Image (spheres, helix red, strand yellow):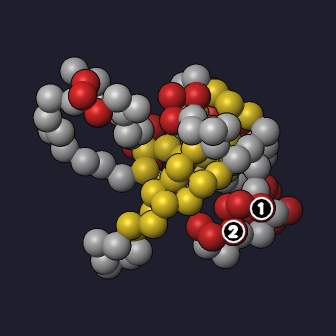
Amino acid sequence: ILITYAQPKDESLVASVLTKYSVTAFATEEYLKNHPLTGPEDLINHSCILIDSMLVDEANIWRFRVHGSETVYDYRVTGNYICDNTQTAQELARNNLGIVFAPKESL
């Protein structure tokens, strides 16, 4: 069983989806003070901390749902760092190096 917040690149490996859970973009207050962000559409101007398993053409696709709606929007994000696990990505974000997309429970 693989539990991941990333869509698998090979959908044929998925026998069934057990559940869905949300992930959120996180950054330190200091990073946001120096690099203001008003919404997901601004992510294109930021250094996002990428996860290697989610790479598509040197970028990650982050999905955001409109609050109170089932509408989902995909945003293509790029960044200066590519990590192979979320713990490393979170440490980079804690050190004011960008925005990380991670499950709230893992922070």
Q: What's the residue type where badge 2 is placed? A: Asp
Seen in the image, is 19 located left or right of residue 47? left
Instruction: Name the side, left or right, on which 28 lies relative to 60.
Output: right
Label 2 with label 1: CB-CB less than 8 Å: yes
Residue 75 in picture, x, y percent from top left: 56, 59
Q: In the image, is 57 to the left or to the right of 81?
A: left
Q: Which residue position is annotated with label 1?
A: 45
Dot 2 falls on a residue whose secondary structure is helix
Residue wearing tag 2: 42
Looking at the picture, how far across and down is residue 49, in whole percent? 67, 41
Compared to residue 72, the image places residue 100 above or below, namely: above
The percent coordinates of residue 37 (x first, y second) are 71, 69
Q: Is residue 90 above or below residue 40?
A: above
Residue at image x 77%, y 61%?
Answer: 45
Within-10-Å neighbours for mark 2: few <14, some 14–19, many 20+ = few
**Front-lying residue, 58 or 51:** 58
Kindly indicate the quadrant of the structure image that contains residue 93. Answer: top right
Residue 32 location, quadrant:
bottom right
Q: Quadrant of the N terminus?
A: top left
107 and 46: which is toward the camera:
46
Q: Residue at the spot x=57%, y=38% of the render?
A: 56
- Of 76 and 97, the residue lying toward us: 76
Query: As displayed, is residue 47 above or below residue 95?
Result: below
Q: Check disc 1 and report its element: helix, strand or loop.
A: helix
Task: Report x, y in % for residue 31.
Answer: 78, 55
Q: Amino acid at mark 1?
A: Asn
